[in-house]
Image (cartoon, helix red, strand yellow):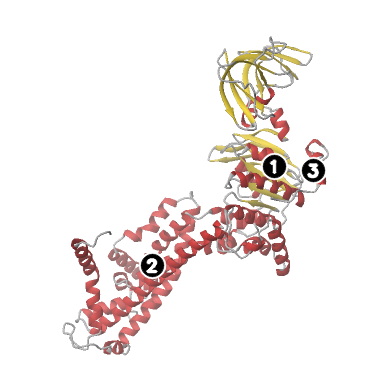
Amino acid sequence: MKHWSGFNIASVAVGLAFLYLPITILVIYSFNASRLVTVWGGFSTHWYGELFHNQGLMDAAWVTIRVALLSASVTTVLGTMAAVVLNRFHRFPGRLLFSGMVAAPMVMPDVILGLSLLLLFVSLDLDRGFWTVVLAHITCTMCFVTVVVQSRLVSFDRSLEEAAQDLGCPPWKAFFLVTLPVIWPAVAAGWMLTFTLSLDDLVIASFTSGPGATTLPMKIYSQVRLGVTPEINAVCTILIAIVSLGVVVAALVNRRQEQRRARDERLAAQ
Amino acid sequence: MAAAPPKSLGNIRRSFEPWSDPAAKPLIEVDRVTKSFAGFKAVDDLSLAIHPREFHALLGPSGCGKSTLLRMLAGFETPTAGDIRLDGRSLTGVPPHRRPVNMMFQSYALFPHMSVEKNIAFGLKQDGMARSEIADRVAEMLKLVKLGPFAKRKPQQLSGGQQQRVALARSLAKRPKVLLLDEPLGALDKKLREETQFELMDLQQELGLTFVVVTHDQEEAMVMADRISVMRDGRIQQVATPAVIYEAPATRYVADFIGNVNILDGTVESVADGRVRIATDAGAVEVEGANGVRSADPVAFAIRPEKMRISRTPPERADVNALRGEIWDIAYLGDVTLYNVKLATGNVLRSTVINAHRGIADPLTWDETVWLSFPSDAGIVLTA
């Protein structure tokens, strides 16, 4: 932007406010000393302390983190495998169906996914709880890893893998020694994506969870229905902090990579 | 760039022609190999024998099947029919990682997450070589390609020429029986390419290895190879030394693909005493070496531009092997001058004159009437 004209400043301000005002208010009120959410009673970190004594919320957070870690990890393995298959094998029976089915959960409404998974679990007579949520999240997030990794594989030079085989690696070893290290950033990005998706999923978890496996979004939602407490503001602020940290780290890593690339180019030109 | 090879190597080269010895055992035997991709025959019933220590070039335009043949030697493609033998043993069903051949890829395919030395050591590690031995071999390879100071660098921190050397060192590190090179110099600029051609030749002789190189650059093939296979549409048109390919092309396609050539279509008038007289639309020509043509056969007469004399005055015998025309185009290239001469019949023939002397007092110029003449052993008869 060349000129900070009045209109430009105004549009930026309004745009930012539209996006971040609600979050800012939430963060500010998490430091409210007053029990009443809408009345400012001075600065305090009281609710953060309180939060850690709220066993219900802490349990829910722990469940969520375990679900997210587990489902993101399994999803990353399965999603990467699907991406490799779709990238490498252009002709096999049912390829079109497979590629369609892999991507379907991305466009399917969560409510429908949740409901159908619930029906499946019920008909299989599975006890709903921690593991059913994990299974459900794996099912619904695998497509995101596949999409991210597949788009990386498109630009991956297959001759790298062939070179590894040519030098004495069996195909599986060539994949782990050469392909995986090269496409690693995409795989990691897929993991991060599914981790956050699992972390904030409410709909699918509500359908597929059972007693003793309440996730944090479920807990927050049920508490908010009884009225917003400053504790909820505090827990949300922590979540925002974690996500922001992730974004900042990603940006820093990205910048460092660019600097390294520029340095490499300088070295190569010498 | 490379030190001059010892004198003796030149002598070895001169006497090196195992392909004309019927008792010599080839290292690679390609036996009636066909490779089809969804009905399209990339390689079509092709047979070829490559001898130990030979520098063999597969030459042809893109899509002629040369890369497919190379990839079948490496094991990345499986022949649809036929067999490939190495040292007498069939390679059918042997996966790439168990073949005693290594390949240098056109894109170099250097592992971007490994340093230069790790790249070179990669194949040795897969073989389970002892660590100290690997270090020695890597040092040796780095010295061979003169990249010692760059051992710790990543491939993307190297120039194109340096990357090419790393790729070469990596593919040579395992001392393969055969090194396959896929357009090894394609990504280098012209000057570097010329230097590297000679380096590759010296390296191949020093190490006593068999090289099979795929290229579409006829000059590259001529410079480096002991023998060239000229390929077209999945078949080999001719396998011969560069000199034979150039001086005695087997087909019109080969004559046209390698170097410049003037081709005149005609009919055989008479064959007598090993001399063929051909009536072409531009005039009568006489050629030595009948190679089985008979009267009234439709043939083509081919002659290289440098084998035609260009003069203002008519040659002694103007009725045969002498064509009259006008200078149509002149291209001065420094070492040679090209003349395109347009005959009365409309054919444009090219003649090149070596500029052996500085300056020409009375140079030929545009629209001048000139004679193109040649002895009867200068051209050849093509039947295919």
Q: Is residue B171 above or below residue A129?
A: above
Could you give the CA–CA distance between mark 2 and mark 1, rounded to whole angstroms? Answer: 53 Å
Dot 3: element: helix
Left or right: where A85 falls relative to B195: left
Q: Is residue B135 above or below residue B47?
A: below
Q: Residue at x 25, y 74 (%)?
A: A23
How far is the residue under mark 3 from the one under mark 2?
A: 63 Å
- Residue B285 disc label: none
Q: How far across and down, in percent of the image, does residue A39 sit?
A: 16, 84
Q: Are marks 3 and 2 on the same chain?
A: no
Which residue is found at the position 63% from the left and 35% from the top? B231
Q: B32 and B153: which one is in front?
A: B153
Identify whether A150 is placed above or below B288. Answer: below
Task: Say which label, 3 or 1, has the lower sequence index.
Answer: 3
SS of the residue at dot 2? Answer: helix
Q: Residues within 10 Å of mark 1 (few under 14, many from 20)?
A: many
- Where residue B322 sits, quadrant-wise, is top right
Q: Examine the image and state in which quarter residue A169 appears.
A: bottom right
Q: Position of residue B110 (x, y in %)?
A: 58, 57
Q: Amino acid at mark 2?
A: Leu
- The tag on residue B224 is 1
Label 2 lies in what chain?
A: A
Mark 3 lies on residue: B10
**Dot 3 falls on which chain?**
B
Gap between marks 3 and 1 measured at Cα: 13 Å
Q: Would residue B187 be visible to someone looking at this image?
A: yes
The amino acid at mark 3 is Gly
Q: Are marks 2 and 1 in contact (CB under 8 Å)?
A: no
Residue B252 x %, y %: 63, 25
